[in-house]
Structure formats: C-alpha cells, structure tokens
Image (cartoon, rainbow, N blue to C red):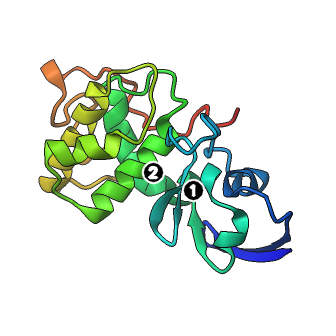
Amino acid sequence: MIVTVELNGKKITREIAPDLLLADFVRNEGCLSVKRGCETANCGLCTVFLNDVPVLSCGVLTARADGCRVTTLEGIRDEAWEFGAFIADQGAEQCGFCNPGFVMNAVALFRENPDPTEEEIREYLAGNLCRCSGYEGQLRGIQAYLAWKKAGRPRTQAGELSGESKGDRPGDPGGESKGDGSGNIAEGAEE
C-alpha cells in the first residue's frame, strides 16, 4: 500500500506493509527520537503529533497517517530546545530515554494551555513513564519554563536566555544550575 505523509514539514510517499506501525515508519525515516518502550501504548516514549495532536505512534497504523502531518521531536527542535534547558536545570533529564516523549507532551500542553495549573501539568505527566525520576524535577522544570515565558524573556542568537546567566532562570534554587544548561534534549535519542 502507498501512503503520503508530511513528516516534519517534508512530504514523502512510501510503499508500506498494511500493518506497519507509525513508530516504525518514522524511525525508518530517520526520526530516532521516537522510541519503543512498552509497545502497549502506555509509556509515552513514542509520542508524535498527528495533525498537531499528540498520539502514541506504537498504537497507530501508518495507513491512518496517510494524507496527514506527522511531527516528531526532530520537527520541533527549536521549540523543544528552549524548554529542554529548564528540564536539565532541574536535573530531571536523568538517563534521557523518556525525554523525547515527555518533551512532545509538554509542548502539546504549552500549545493547548499556556497557563496550566499544577494539576493540569500532572495530568500531562501521567502519560509519560520515567523510571529515573519522581516527576518532581519535570514538574519544577515546566513551572520554571512557564514562569520564564510569562516574564517575556526572549532567547538571544547563541541560544542563551536573554538577560540571564546559566543558573539564573526562574526556579533555579540558589542560582546554581543543576544541568549543563545546553538543552540538548535529543542527545542520546538514538538507540
């Protein structure tokens, strides 16, 4: 069967097996941020946007994406980078295996609800399995990022956060950065 998908802004047409999962399709196309964790659509590691809606790609047949837009972390790299620095600053990246799915869902939250309550943030985190952290660092990272965005502090050309030095972002206890501040959230995304 032949499908045409807009993957990260690029239109591609491929012949596929009817039972090919979307997770496997995007990985075959080089989008290695999409991972298989549980293979039961429960862990969030395989999250992609299908027409701008987050879906678990291990539970979606590629045939259902025919004629649709599919976006992976590679397709929202700039948007994700900015947020990823806050996660690193909170020490919430740990091993990094869950980061791509977590960041995809966090970006979906920011797009849907730019001023979520703590309860709404926790609802979004509930769909992401992380075996390293207790989710508190991720929650603090999201809250710090939202506070920074609300303050309207833009990024400068080198990716530095305007008017701030490393470790001087909202939510950084004692002004010390817990991460390297690089925001390389996709680092190590390849298996």
Q: Are marks 2 and 1 in contact (CB under 8 Å)?
A: yes
Visible in this render: residue 1? yes
| x and y percentages locating residue 137 in the rendered image | 28, 27
The residue beneath circle 1 is 72
- Quadrant of the drawing holding the C terminus: top right
Mark 1 secondary-structure assignment? loop
Q: Which mark is residue 15?
A: none
How busy is the neighbourhood of tag 2: few (under 14 within 10 Å), some, or many (20 plus)?
many
Of 59 and 47, nearer the camera is 59
How busy is the neighbourhood of tag 1: few (under 14 within 10 Å), some, or many (20 plus)?
many
Of 4 and 82, nearer the camera is 4
Give the amino acid at mark 1.
Answer: Thr
| x and y percentages locating residue 99 in the rendered image | 48, 36
Above or below, comparing residue 104 to residue 9 in the picture:
above
Determine the residue positioned at 51% across, 72% down: 51
Give the amino acid at mark 2.
Answer: Met
| x and y percentages locating residue 189 in the rendered image | 61, 36
| x and y percentages locating residue 105 in the rendered image | 40, 50
Circle count:
2
Q: Determine the residue located farthest toward the bottom in the rendered image.
A: 67
Determine the residue positioned at 31% across, 28% down: 135
Mark 2 secondary-structure assignment? helix
How far apart are labels 2 and 1 at the CA level? 8 Å
Visible in this render: residue 163? no
Above or below, comparing residue 186 to residue 180 in the picture:
below
First reached walking from the N terminus: tag 2 or tag 1: 1
Question: Which of the 4 quarters of the picture holds residue 190?
Answer: top right
Question: Which of the 4 quarters of the picture holds residue 4?
Answer: bottom right
Q: Which mark is residue 104?
A: 2
